[in-house]
Image: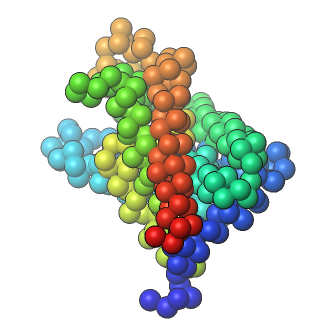
Amino acid sequence: MSNTLIKSPKDVIFGWKSLSITKSEIPALRLLALAVLAGTYIGFAAHLATTVSVGWAEAGFPAGLENFFVGSVFSVGLMLVIIPGSELFTGNTLMTIGWFSGSIGARGMLRNWVLVYIGNFAGSIFLAFLLAGATGLLDGAVGGKAIAIAYGKVTAEAGVLPHWASFLARAVACNILVTLAVLMAGSATTVGGKILAVFFPIMAFVASGFEHSVANMYFLPAGIIASGFDAAAGSSGIAPAQLAKLGWGSIWTGNLIVVTIGNIIGGGFFVGGLYYLIHKTGK
C-alpha cells in the first residue's frame, strides 16, 4: 500500500504526544460541547444495537450470529466520533502517551478526562430521555431488550469471579480494542480507511461481551427509563421484584465505576503506555 494512504505505527503513537497537548488545552465549554456530541453519537449506536438485537432468540438464530450483527452496527458510533470529530473519554485515555513523554502534566490530562466524561454522560443520558419521552421507541419490545441489557450489566456474575472483577476484566479488554481502533483510524488518511479501521475492533469488543463505559452511559439509563413502561417491563422477562435492583445508584456501584477504571487501564496503560515504551526504546 502506498505510504500516502497509511502512517507508520511509530508516527501514529508519537502523534499522540502533540495531540495530547492540543486536547489538554481545549477551552472548557468547547471541550464539553464536543464531549456531549460524542456521548450522543455513542448513544445512537447503542440504541441501534439494542434495536437490532430484538427477536433473534425467538426466531431460533444462534447467539453468536446475533452478537456479530449487534457489534457490526454498534461500530457506527466510533465512526461518527472520529470522522466529524468529537471528544470520547475512552479514546482519550491514549493521552497517557503525552503524560509519559512529558508533553503534558497529569493535571492537563485529568482535566480533559473529567470534562469529557461529564460531557459524554450528558449526551448519552439526553439521548436516552429523548428516545423515551419524545419518540416512544422504548415502550415495547425494544424497551424490554433495553431493560434486559441494563439489568444484566448491574447484576451479572461470571463463574468464580465476583461481579466487579469480571466487569473490570471486560472493561480492560474492551478499551484495548477501542484504543487500537482509534490508533488504526489515525493511521489511515482516507475516510474509507478510517471506517474499515474502526469496524473490526469495535465489532469484536461488542460481539465478545466486553464493557465500554460511555456505551453504558446510554444502555443503563435507557433500561431504567424503559422499566417505567408497562409494555417494556412485561417484555423484558425480568420479574418486577428483580427490577428493583436496577436504579440510578446501581448504575454507578454495579457498573460504571469499575468499568471506567478498567477502560483507563486497558487504553491508557496496556495500549498507550506499552506502545509508547516500545517505540520510545526502539525495541
Q: Is residue 10 visible?
A: yes
Decide: is 282 above or below 158.
below
Q: In this view of the protein, which residue sits in the foreground, 211 or 276?
A: 276
**Picture coordinates of residue 66 (x, y %)?**
27, 49
Q: Which quadrant of the structure image shows residue 119?
A: top right
Q: Residue 87 vs residue 138: left or right?
A: right
Q: In this figure, what is the number of numbered marks?
A: 0
**Picture coordinates of residue 139 (x, y %)?**
45, 29
Q: Residue 36 vs residue 188: left or right?
A: right
Q: Could you tell me which residue is drawn at 58 percent across and 71 percent down?
A: 12
Decide: is 54 above or below 272.
above
Q: Could you tell me which residue is drawn at 21 percent across and 39 percent down?
A: 57
Decide: is 83 above or below 265.
below
**Picture coordinates of residue 134 (x, y %)?**
61, 35
Q: Could you tell me which residue is drawn at 46 percent across and 51 percent down?
A: 270
Q: Could you tell me which residue is drawn at 57 percent across and 67 percent down?
A: 280
Q: Residue 99 vs residue 60: left or right?
A: right
